[in-house]
Image (spheres, rainbow, N blue to C red):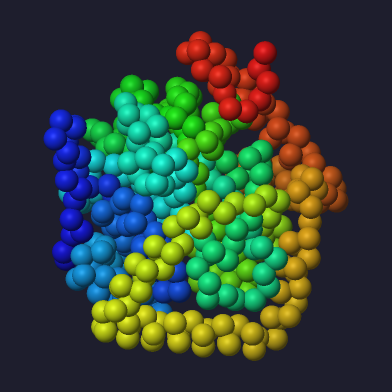
Amino acid sequence: MPRAACSATAPGSRPMGARTIVTMMKDEAPFLLHWIAHHRLIGFDRIVVFTNDCSDGSDAMLDRLAAMGEVIHHPNPVPRGGKPQPLALRRADKLAEVRESDWIITLDTDEYLNIKPGDGTLDALFATAPDADGFAITWRMMGSNGLRDWTDTPVTEAYTRGAPDLFRKGWGVKTLFRPFDDMKLGIHRPTLKGKDKSALLARSWVNGSAKPMTQAFKQDMWRSSLATLGYAHAEIAHYATQSQEAYLRRAARGNVNAKPDKYNATYYAIFDRNETDRTGLLRHAEATRARVAGYLADPQLHDLADRALHWHEAARAELRAAPDYPARMDALHDASRIPFDALDDILFTQPLAPAGKQMVARMRAQGIPDRQIARAVAQAVQRIEAQRDAADAAELRTMGVTPDHGNWG
């Protein structure tokens, strides 16, 4: 399949190859054109897409986009019991079009890179830390804006409210990095094949404020701490919830790690964050819409997209006709009304390690109320996080770096 053209090398600059996104998609027709257009617009010239088990025709759309030079599309067959995301990453690891890139990031279709300086492009981000070979960019969890029903408005325009900086549950990162020998792709950041971490520790990685990441992060972390959190220059807008109806459709589609019941009302309560205005991506709205219109000027792609959107209209009609639809929507509505300062009262077991989940199961078996268990879990996690915050801050102080957040004396 044709590749998108690589960026040219400016006279006197270091050699620059493709800037590559690796992504996985299933039934993403309502979103994929806008997502691709945005990321091509800000400077990615190679988007490598893996698809599995598509029913809506989005795989055919991606084949056409590949023929147009906008993406590289690979099937990602998943055996029974397999997980799409790890399989796709292992396949991507072996591709020259990925490994020969100058920069790589792994993103999902509900994640948009938001670059704040200058014209909002990758070049503007790289200028904030010219010697860096990695940017660990923290999520900004984006909420529903109070929308109940499906909307055809692009997500960056429909959902313009998000979490405050100190929403710790939303501090996962996505790492934009220069590839290196023996790297192993990961969904949040690359790791190394084998046990020797020295090559990782030697990387010059910075956060979204162009401040150094710690050795502890480079070794095996995938989340920011209070000391390493940085939103000044870049963040990942993560549209994990969207409207209540869109969320139900997402739950019906499944998830890339085959986690049962991931998209439940508890997840919505935690991540439907609307406390702050987050309108930075609107700067690209007009140009992104124009690029999508350019794609759809191709008659073949237009026809494929039209058929795919009709498939989704039918799927939503089927969803609305289900007997449990009103109750499920009401559950999400109730979840969305839980205030920010009450989140520690919600028992959210998905991020817990197996030992933590076993502890919760034992406490439930003893008849302890979920709210009490949730508070106990939150307190235990807070103790662990405080230790990491302090250790990261101490390391940064030895480098003469002042963290963006926290009062470390």
Q: Residue furthest left?
A: 11
> What residue lies at 64% left-to-right and 76% top-to-bottom?
149
Relative placement, left or right, of 364 versus 85 is right
User: x, y (%) of residue 307?
Assistant: 38, 86
User: x, y (%) of residue 84?
Assistant: 39, 60
User: x, y (%) of residue 262?
Assistant: 59, 60
> What residue lies at 64% left-to-right and 85% top-to-bottom?
320
Relative placement, left or right, of 334 versus 247 is right
Relative placement, left or right, of 380 versus 53 is right
Q: Is residue 218 above or below residue 162?
A: above
Residue 90 seen in the figure: no
> What residue lies at 32% left-to-right and 62% top-to-bottom?
50
Q: Nearer the viewer, residue 292 or 108?
A: 292
User: x, y (%) of residue 167?
Assistant: 66, 42
Q: Quadrant of the C terminus?
A: top right
Q: Nearer the viewer, residue 26 or 310?
A: 310
Q: Is residue 192 above or below residue 21?
A: above
Residue 40 seen in the figure: yes
> What residue lies at 75% left-to-right and 77% top-to-bottom?
327
Count of marks, rendered view: 0
